[in-house]
Image (cartoon, coloured by chain):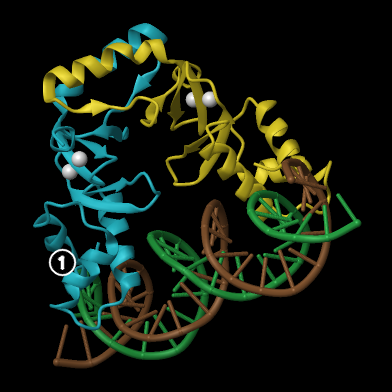
Chain colours: A cyan, B yellow, C brown, D green
Amino acid sequence: MKYSKQRDVILNTVLSSYNHPTAEEIYEIVRKEIPNISLGTVYRNLNKLAEAGIIKKIQMSNGNFRFDRQEDTYNHFYCKQCDQIHDIPSSNFKDINTIIKDKIGYEIDIFDTMFVGICKNCQNK
Amino acid sequence: MKYSKQRDVILNTVLSSYNHPTAEEIYEIVRKEIPNISLGTVYRNLNKLAEAGIIKKIQMSNGNFRFDRQEDTYNHFYCKQCDQIHDIPSSNFKDINTIIKDKIGYEIDIFDTMFVGICKNCQNK
DNA sequence: AATGAAAGTAGTAATGATTACTACTTAAGG
DNA sequence: CCTTAAGTAGTAATCATTACTACTTTCATT
Ligand SMILES: [Mn+2]
Ligand SMILES: [Mn+2]
Ligand SMILES: [Zn+2]
Ligand SMILES: [Zn+2]
């Protein structure tokens, strides 16, 4: 992979984001540093970085994508109420794989499964 | 809700489908009975039927929708390998809600969560 | 340093599933 | 029968994402 200023800035933007930004949101941030960067370039590099396993590409319930740092100790939970992705330590889901595997023989990939429900904050309302 | 031949045929098509068809697939089947039906009509009625709780609208990992009979005793599992949705009796997931609730306080809605992984068939290959 | 091929980019066009719009048609209650 | 609200066919618009094209940059090799 050849070096490019564009990819470098895109990567650093993702690495310093803690709110699971969309490609468009990343584009807006990167634009401040490289004003004439193309949105297509942002998409291409985000996909390339995700492909290489350097960042994570996660799918929202509406089919759109969001991007994230690569931390394989965290799972994702989507709250229907506040429309936000929450990080959850994957240790919480450790038992689930074995439960399902024992019961029906299917192997759940917890890092690909986006859990859906109501987060703690939204419950207290 | 006023009666319409179109909606009637669309509903019966969904009710007699066991493979989680897309709107387009339903369109192709309905076309045989009502050749000049509009794809927009299929979409509109599928959404209306889902809204009314008569059928189920489920979201695939690529953001597209598929439609299903309404059986609230079954959950959905998407196999990454064979690209198919499998029905799983929801009793298998009963424990999961309480486990998660106890551990982190979040309430998972198992009927909205699409579990992802490798099905039994694909494991034996 | 000069060269050249492969990889990258900006700008724009295309895609594809879904929804919105519009003028016409139908269901169904009084 | 009328009336009118709901439904339809056909087509245009959306919107996130990807593809295309002509130009530019990186970087290994002379
Ligand atoms: Mn995260
Ligand atoms: Mn099903
Ligand atoms: Zn919430
Ligand atoms: Zn499978």
Q: Which is more toward the observer, A10 or B61?
A: B61
Quarter of image, res A30: bottom left
**Is D24 situated above or below C29?**
below
Residue lying at 18% horizontally and 32% vertically, measured from the top left: A123
Above or below for A60 versus B88: below
Residue B118 lies, in percent from the top left, at 41, 24
Query: Which secondary structure lies at badge 1?
Result: helix
Residue B124 sits above or below residue A70 on the image: above
Left or right: residue B44 compared with residue A3: right
Q: Please give the name of the residue rendered at 13% of the width and 62% of the height, measured from the top-left corner.
A: A13
Q: Quadrant of the N terminus of chain B?
A: top right
Give the residue type at disc 1: Asp
Residue A39 visible, this angle: yes
Q: Is residue A30 left or right of residue B113?
A: left
Q: Left or right: where does residue D17 sit relative to residue A35? A: right
Q: Residues within 10 Å of mark 1 (few under 14, many from 20)?
A: few
The structure residue drawn at horizontal position 14% and vertical position 25%, both measured from the top left corner, is: B105
Q: State which quadrant residue A5 falls in.
A: bottom left
Residue B48 image position (x, y, % from top left):
57, 43
Residue A39 position, x and y percent, is: 32, 72
- At 15% from the left edge and 66% from the top edge, which residue is drawn? A8
Q: Nearer the viewer, residue A80 or A37?
A: A80
Chain hosting mark 1: A
Q: Residue furthest left?
A: A16
The answer to whether residue A105 shows anywhere in this view is: no
User: How many callouts does the rendering have?
Assistant: 1
The answer to whether the beta carbon of the residue marked 1 is less than 8 Å from any atom of ligand 1 is no
Depth order, front residue of B55/A15: B55
Describe residue B8's horizontal placement relative to residue D19 as left or right.
right
Q: Which residue is mark 1?
A: A8
Which residue, as the protein is rendered here, is positioned at the far top? A102
